[in-house]
Image (spheres, rainbow, N blue to C red):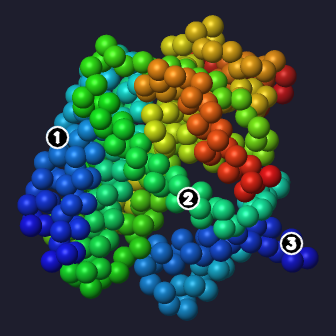
């Protein structure tokens, strides 16, 4: 039963990742792209953890943790760039 | 058996919410409304997977792990911050102060008020 | 003296707990090293934390966290229903100004985060004087109701905790 649920979750997050990718390429503005990238990071973390359950190993958690941190920092950096990019400091 | 049901239910629920969040990103009409879907739905999607993984490893693998708890906490703490920063960037790039409701105080919104941001001050 | 050594006792405890959780092992060595980090990091960064937030009612913090967690789950169902089933022509997004009674920056930060995580609202900006918060609602036919809801459910509780 867990196996079926795992496959279902894999499909959901994989499809979500594809939708985000579509939003990254076809977006009306830069904030939308950054938002889609941020969502991609969260979906990728979920996929990593799912893969960890699938393989029965805890080694992917560290990857997920690092991913969460770098994803957050990069989103903040993008947002700061958008807020300051056109201002000569 | 009961744990199997709980883990499976969590995984299915998380998958549905993750999908809804990503779908909202495509379906909703404006940038600000799009901001709602991923900050909420995807965070619960990720959190559901992480809690499911924690239960799974504790019950079936006899391996207690707090990393998932840390990741969940981290996601829940950072989601509002990224949402706020993206909203500010959107306000800065697209909206004009006249389109927003008044603050009800004698100062404007901080994004448009250069003196509110010490790093942007020109008087040094 | 003690205050100089431990500028932020709560931060020290949190850092130690986070270190032990990261190491995923409750052994004396990790606890001691976590404690060393927990003392060193607040000491080094003390210049960036001029005053520490004061928590008035620790028990109310737990109640607040439970309420917010419940609301996060509830908000997910609400947003999911809007995303999936509501016709876009019926969607009523709105900007709402919420006047603030809170004054401490920490309390306002927590309130802004709570607003973002709970039903159909995202906090977007703060007024330059910090007396009002700009909230975007996904679907708000009644915007005054949203303001009253936020003030009654979260702000009054945060006021008891922080001020």
Residue A56 vs A44, above or below: the answer is below
Co-location on one chain, circles 1 and 2:
no
Residue C29 vertical position relative to residue C68 in the rendered view, above or below: below
The residue drawn where x is 19% and y is 55% is: B12
- CA separation, marks 1 and 2? 32 Å
Q: How far, Cα to Cα, is label 2 from label 3?
A: 28 Å
> Which residue is nearer to you in this view: A71 or C82?
C82
In this rendering, position of residue C143 left or right of residue B26: right
Task: Answer few, some or many: residues within 10 Å of disc 1's Cα (few below 14, many 20 plus, some between 14 and 19).
Answer: some
Residue A21 % position (x, y) = 24, 33
Q: Which residue is mark 3?
A: C3
Position of B91 relative to C25 (above/below) = above
Reading the image, the residue beneath label 1 is A15
Comes first in the chain, label 2 or label 3:
3
Q: Chain of mark 2?
A: C
Task: Identify the residue at image location x=45%, y=65%.
Answer: B70
Residue B104 in view here: yes
| Coordinates of residue C60 in the picture (x, y in percent) | 66, 62
The residue tagged 2 is C65
* Pointer 3 local density, CA inside 10 Å: few below 14, some 14–19, many at least 20: few
Q: Is residue C4 left or right of residue A54?
A: right
Quadrant position of the N terminus of chain C in the picture: bottom right
Question: Label for residue B50?
Answer: none
């Amino acid at each position: 039963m867990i196996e079926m649920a795992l496959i279902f979750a894999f499909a959901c997050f994989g499809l979500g990742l594809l939708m985000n990718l579509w939003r990254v390429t076809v977006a009306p503005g830069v904030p939308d792209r950054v938002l889609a990238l941020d969502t991609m990071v969260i979906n990728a973390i979920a996929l990593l953890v799912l893969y960890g359950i699938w393989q029965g190993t805890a080694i992917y958690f560290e990857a997920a943790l690092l991913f969460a941190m770098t994803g957050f920092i990069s989103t903040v950096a993008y947002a700061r760039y958008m807020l300051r990019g056109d201002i000569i400091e | 058996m009961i744990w199997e049901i709980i883990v499976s239910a969590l995984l299915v629920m998380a998958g549905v919410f993750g999908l809804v969040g990503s779908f909202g990103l495509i379906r909703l009409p404006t940038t600000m409304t799009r901001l709602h879907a991923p900050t909420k739905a995807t965070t619960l999607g990720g959190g559901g997977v992480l809690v499911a993984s924690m239960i799974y490893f504790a019950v079936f693998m006899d391996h207690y792990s707090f990393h998932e708890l840390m990741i969940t906490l981290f996601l829940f703490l950072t989601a509002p911050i990224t949402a706020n920063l993206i909203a500010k960037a959107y306000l800065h790039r697209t909206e004009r102060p006249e389109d927003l409701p008044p603050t009800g105080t004698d100062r404007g919104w901080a994004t448009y008020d250069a003196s509110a941001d010490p790093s942007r001050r020109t008087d040094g | 003296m003690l205050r100089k050594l431990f500028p932020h006792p709560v931060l020290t405890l949190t850092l130690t707990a986070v270190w032990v959780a990261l190491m995923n092992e409750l052994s004396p060595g990790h606890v001691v090293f976590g404690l060393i980090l927990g003392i060193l990091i607040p000491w080094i960064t003390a210049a960036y934390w001029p005053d520490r937030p004061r928590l008035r009612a620790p028990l109310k913090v737990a109640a607040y966290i439970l309420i917010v967690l419940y609301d996060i789950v509830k908000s997910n169902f609400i947003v999911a229903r809007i995303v999936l089933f509501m016709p876009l022509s019926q969607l009523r997004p709105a900007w709402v100004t919420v006047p603030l009674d809170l004054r401490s920056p920490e309390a306002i930060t927590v309130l802004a985060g709570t607003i973002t995580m709970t039903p159909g609202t995202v906090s977007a900006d703060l007024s330059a004087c910090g007396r009002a918060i700009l909230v975007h609602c996904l679907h708000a036919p009644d915007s005054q109701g949203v303001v009253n809801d936020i003030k009654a459910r979260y702000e009054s509780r945060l006021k008891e905790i922080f001020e």
